[in-house]
Amino acid sequence: MAVYTKVSAEEIDAFLTRFDVGTLISAKGIAEGVENSNYLIETTQDRFILTLYEKRVDPNDLPFFIAMLDHLAAKNCPVPPMIADRKGITIQELCGKSACLIKFLPGVSVTTPTPNQAQATGRALGEMHNALQDFSGKRANSMNHDTWRKLAIDCGPSELDVIAPGLHALVASELDHLDQNWPDRLPTSVIHADLFPDNVLMLNDQVTGLIDFYFSCTDIRAYDVAVTHAAWCFSEDGESFDAAVSNALIQGYSDAFPLSDEDRAALPVLARGASLRFMLTRAYDWINTPADALVTRKDPAAFLNRLKFYQANPDVFQI
């Protein structure tokens, strides 16, 4: 979440008149994240998230996201429904951008997950995968491994080496490895593809919300496990790995959706791919984020450290 498009209180107040949600009390921009513009809205009735879609979110994909969230909500998964206006319209326009008003879910995002919280998150991910098995919607992964080489080129070799000496050569070598070893026979489904701790809301050790589905797509199901593992099992800077959190996350997921032997065998290369993907997108944002944007840039070195860990520890998923 972030703020790229600045919306005045008067504009938000007028926007809310389209809905039966009460009148505006307060609106605050949310600086975390890098994808969309987000505001925490409080009205006389409730709290909501107002999202304006920027950059990588194609407005044509919004019906897919809405259908997926409706499907998950109908199966009692903890996801935030999007609010329709008085005419039954969910996708709005505000300040020249596609926008949605989204139900606010209780809970907080943890910064240093415990094993119990990781196990609950793994279980929630597995339950989400179960719920999506009969979802008919499909969306191509706009950030799949076929796109990473172009993304590296777009970052620029000299700019990558500014982030970390020798990074351009390391990326080129890793891209070759992944092209040679990426699995192509594992089961696919709709996945979250971005289940970082800040996209999971918790109260104590219970998951109260899975949020921010805007990278959701059809891809290898076990890749979602690898992304979540890379996001949850390390310190923020990626320099410390927590084996207890790792084992709990994999156990929680397996309790809800058992991993096959083929899934487990592929997780090391999938985790390397996940680390490279997030390192490259963070590098691109680090290089290209406007200086005056109200947004927290994320350090790409954190996922370089994860990548190096997975390169050196291919047996980390053996529990």
Image (cartoon, helix red, strand yellow):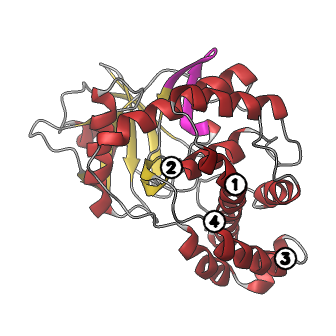
Disc 3 marks a residue whose amino acid type is: Val
Is 202 a magenta residue?
yes
Choose mark 4 or mark 2, whichever is in front: 2
- Which x, y percent locates residue 144? 53, 66
**Which residue lies most toward the front here?**
261
Task: Identify the residue position indicated by label 1 in the image.
Answer: 271
Q: Earlier in the sequence, mark 3 or mark 4?
A: 3
Label 1 crowding class (10 Å Cα cut-off): few <14, some 14-19, many 20+?
Answer: many
Residue 153 horizontal side relative to residue 85, left or right: right
Q: Nearer the viewer, mark 3 or mark 4?
A: 4
Q: CA distance from mark 3 to mark 1?
A: 25 Å
Q: Amino acid at mark 2?
A: Arg
Q: Secondary structure at mark 1?
A: helix
Give the mark, 2 or 1, whose residue is nearer the N terminus.
Answer: 2
Q: Marks 2 and 1, Cα distance to the nearest angstrom?
A: 13 Å
- Between the C-alphas of marks 3 and 4, the distance is 15 Å
Q: Could you tell which of marks 3 and 1 lies nearer the N-terminus?
A: 3
| Residue type at numbered disc 4 | Thr
The residue that label 4 is drawn on is 281
Q: Position of 54 compared to 295: left or right?
A: left
Spatial CA span between label 2 and label 3: 34 Å
Residue at the spot of label 2 = 221
Residue linked to disc 3: 162
